[in-house]
């Protein structure tokens, strides 16, 4: 007589890893949608204004559904709005400018140097000690960027690398400043305040430069919805749900799948070239990210 095996519910850890992979895949589509937006003649202020406006509605609706609707006040609100209007807006704008110089895959790879910048900023601002593994991680990340630039793989440019490195630095500053606030504020609640502030920045920039458009073509709306839902709101929610299950350090390691997703999608959907130098440089950068995360967890 054989015993029937019933369906076993996935473990909390397995679900957490799955959620972070979903998040990485979602964020990995951002560069692809960005290229499609360029081809649809959508300006950067238009894309990002609609991205943050639509994502704001979705994130706040998610918080309300989960019963976690907690509007910030006072100093916390001021910091959150500042992080969005200046920090996250700067990073996002530079990311999309980078797409005008390089392939989506390379932009995603170079942006992933931001953990190295976070370490440097922690050392410079709060005197955090640097251990051997962290130094190795920094060397790996910088070596990856040098390989991407020096070997001049297809789709790369020095100007584009500089722009995206500036985006990575802006993101690192955003993370560094937000650390103190996250001690008392739920990360998803913080994100819910950062998104509309960033959106206002691009409405102002777009209005001032005359680059703010009202899309009319269905294809343009499909791109904007894709950016807001698949590349912003969904991965944000999945990311924080994953953190709750497997912790920040492991989430950071699993999230390194993001640039790989962008590279694969870029090759499959946009016919972007993938050279040996691209793969090698990206592998060095991601190895540096993993080393940093393991050093933090140690």
Image (cartoon, helix red, strand yellow):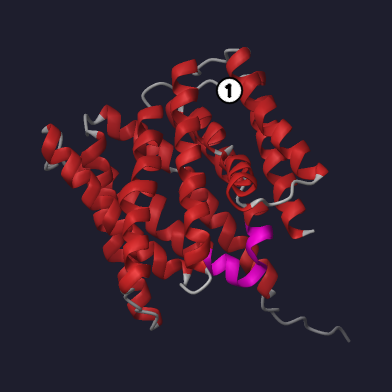
Q: In the figure, residue 65 lies in which quadrant?
A: bottom left
Q: Residues within 10 Å of mark 1 (few under 14, many from 20)?
A: some
Horizontal relation, residue 271 to residue 219: left or right:
right
Residue that carries the numbered disc 1 in the rendered image: 274
Along the line of sight, which residue is nearer the eye, 217 or 208? 208
Secondary structure predominantly adopted by residues drawn in magenta: helix
Residue 125 inside the magenta-drawn segment: no
- Residue at 21% x, 52% y is 200
Q: Position of residue 277 (x, y in %)?
A: 65, 19
Along the line of sight, which residue is nearer the eye, 6 or 9? 9
Q: In the figure, residue 204 lies in which quadrant?
A: top left
Q: Position of residue 28 (x, y in %)?
A: 49, 44
Residue 241 inside the magenta-drawn segment: yes
Of the 4 image quadrants, the one containing the N terminus is bottom right
* Residue 131 appearing in the image: yes
**Up/down of 222 relative to 107, above or below:** below
Q: Which residues are magenta?
A: 240-251
- Residue at 54% x, 51% y is 24
Q: Position of residue 84 (x, y in %)?
A: 34, 54
Horizontal relation, residue 97 to residue 221: left or right:
right
Of the 4 image quadrants, the one containing the C terminus is bottom right
* Residue 55 appearing in the image: no
Horizontal relation, residue 50 to residue 11: left or right:
left
Q: What kind of element bears circle 1?
A: loop
**Up/down of 23 relative to 185, above or below:** above
Q: Position of residue 152 (x, y in %)?
A: 57, 12
- Residue at 68% x, 59% y is 250
**Up/down of 62 relative to 200, above or below:** below
Horizontal relation, residue 36 to residue 240: left or right:
left
């Amino acid at each position: 007589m054989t015993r029937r095996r019933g369906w076993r519910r996935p473990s909390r850890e397995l679900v957490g890893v799955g959620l972070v992979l979903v998040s990485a895949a979602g964020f990995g589509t951002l560069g692809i949608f960005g290229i499609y937006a360029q081809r649809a003649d959508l300006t950067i202020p238009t894309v990002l204004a609609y991205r943050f406006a639509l994502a704001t509605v979705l994130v706040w609706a998610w918080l309300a559904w989960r019963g976690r609707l907690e509007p910030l006040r006072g100093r916390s609100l001021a910091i959150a709005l500042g992080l969005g209007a200046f920090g996250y807006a700067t990073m996002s704008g530079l990311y999309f400018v980078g797409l005008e110089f390089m392939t989506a895959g390379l932009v995603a790879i170079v942006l992933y140097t931001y953990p190295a910048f976070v370490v440097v900023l922690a050392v410079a601002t709060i005197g955090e000690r640097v251990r051997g593994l962290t130094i190795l991680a920094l060397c790996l990340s910088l070596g990856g960027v040098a390989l991407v630039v020096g070997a001049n793989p297809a789709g790369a440019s020095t100007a584009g690398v500089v722009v995206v490195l500036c985006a990575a630095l802006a993101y690192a500053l955003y993370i560094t400043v937000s650390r103190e606030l996250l001690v008392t504020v739920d990360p998803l609640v913080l994100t819910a305040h950062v998104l509309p502030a960033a959106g206002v920045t691009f409405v102002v920039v777009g209005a001032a430069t005359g680059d703010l458009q009202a899309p009319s073509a269905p294809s343009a709306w499909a791109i904007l919805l894709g950016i807001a839902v698949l590349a912003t709101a969904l991965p944000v929610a999945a990311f924080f749900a994953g953190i709750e299950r497997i912790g920040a350090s492991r989430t950071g390691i699993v999230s390194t799948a993001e640039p790989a997703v962008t590279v694969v999608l870029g090759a499959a959907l946009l016919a972007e070239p993938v050279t040996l130098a691209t793969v090698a440089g990206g592998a060095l950068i991601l190895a540096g990210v993993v080393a940093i995360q393991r050093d933090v967890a140690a």
